[in-house]
Amino acid sequence: MHCPMEGRESADILLAYCAQKLDARSTAILEEHIQICPACRQFADDQKAVWKALDTWEADPVSADFNRRLYARIEKEVSVWDLILRPFRPLVARQGLPIAAAAAVVIMAGVLLDRPSAIEPGPLPDTSATVEVAPDQAEPTLQEMETMRDLNRLMRPENADSKI
Amino acid sequence: MPERVNKDMSGAVAALDYDAELMLRVKDGDGASFGVLLDKHRLPVVHFLQRMVQNHAVAEELAQEVFLRVYRSRSTYEPTAKFTTWLFRIATHLALNSLRDGKNERAQERLDDDTSEMPVRQVSDRKPSVEQALVYQARLDEVRRAVAGLPDKQRAAVLMHKYEEMEYSQIAKVLSCSESAVKSLLFRAYETLRARLAHMA
């Protein structure tokens, strides 16, 4: 066989051999070659030493409260959305999608207008165009609200009866 | 079995798809499936990040961000790759950003550092002698320094190849590069590690 050390592309076969990932036939052929090739023998010995050294590196155990902290962060994100959308729940219940869509537009407008700008805004363009939100654009918002409500129920069963 | 999982698949492939199936359930609003995924992948992700950034507190913070992003992405999730590929792509991206931002400049933790943040390590009943403990610590420090000395992408490739036993193709997808690029990364990384650690045989 060609010596794997002759080219970088074929040296990975030696890595696979050292990691015991080669099939039986390839392993047998390579082991025959290693016996007569000092370069490959040295590579294999050194790589096995590296593997053994890396095996000694045990990772630290995960904190016992890892999950609790993660769920707390998720709940906090869900709660923020709940807080923003809660005032609009009665409107959604009575008036349906058009109001929900309008509410989403109002919230987005509020967020955008509140952002500090790096430069002085120029004069407003003279336009009477209005922005309309199609009902299908409100669907993701309502679906998001539903999923957050389900997660909220998992986090706090006492709120299971809360409704949008 | 749900339609989205092929009944004829081998056990290994079905197991791979099971994570994607769980994530699709999370997409449908099943919070319990997210808990299953978290319990299954929490350790590998945290350990990978620990070895990448070599700081326990930062690693757990990054791991929390990984799973937070997984949860946030649930509504747009599509199983175009293995779930672990996606998961480790997020983890690697965050780790590389953290290393680039220099958050790892905090003192690298040693095994015997006195910090109340670290969980208690389980101690075996057969207590090593003081000399054995010192030798172990010295070897561990040398391994950690050798890995820390690798360029970030080489380090990530080695950690995924060695500890997660990922194939070249999966590492390539995680690192968004070709398989030949992964082979090159690993060749150079192991070459460096052999130079630094082969004497430990």
Image (cartoon, rainbow, N blue to C red):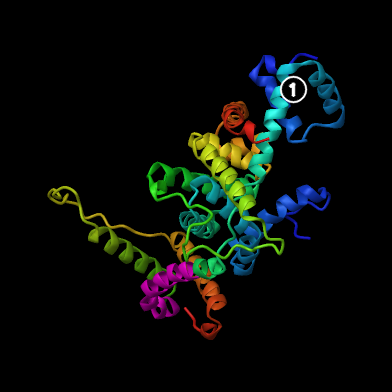
**Dot 1 corresponds to which residue?**
A41
Q: Who is closer to the viewer here, A71 or A158?
A: A71
Q: Position of residue A1 (x, y in %)?
A: 80, 14
Quarter of the figure with residue A99: bottom left
Q: Position of residue B171 (x, y in %)?
A: 61, 38
Q: Who is closer to the viewer here, B158 or B177?
A: B158
* Magenta highlight: main SS: helix
Q: Who is closer to the viewer here, A39 or B141?
A: B141
Q: Position of residue A138 (x, y in %)?
A: 44, 63
Q: Position of residue A86 (x, y in %)?
A: 39, 77
Q: Looking at the picture, which amino acid does disc 1 mark?
A: Arg
Query: Looking at the image, which residue is at 57% across and 47% down?
Result: B88
Q: Is residue B35 left or right of residue A36?
A: left
Q: Is residue A47 above or below residue A57?
A: above
Query: Looking at the image, which residue is at 74% across and 22% down?
Result: A41
The stretch of residues the image draws in magenta is A72-94
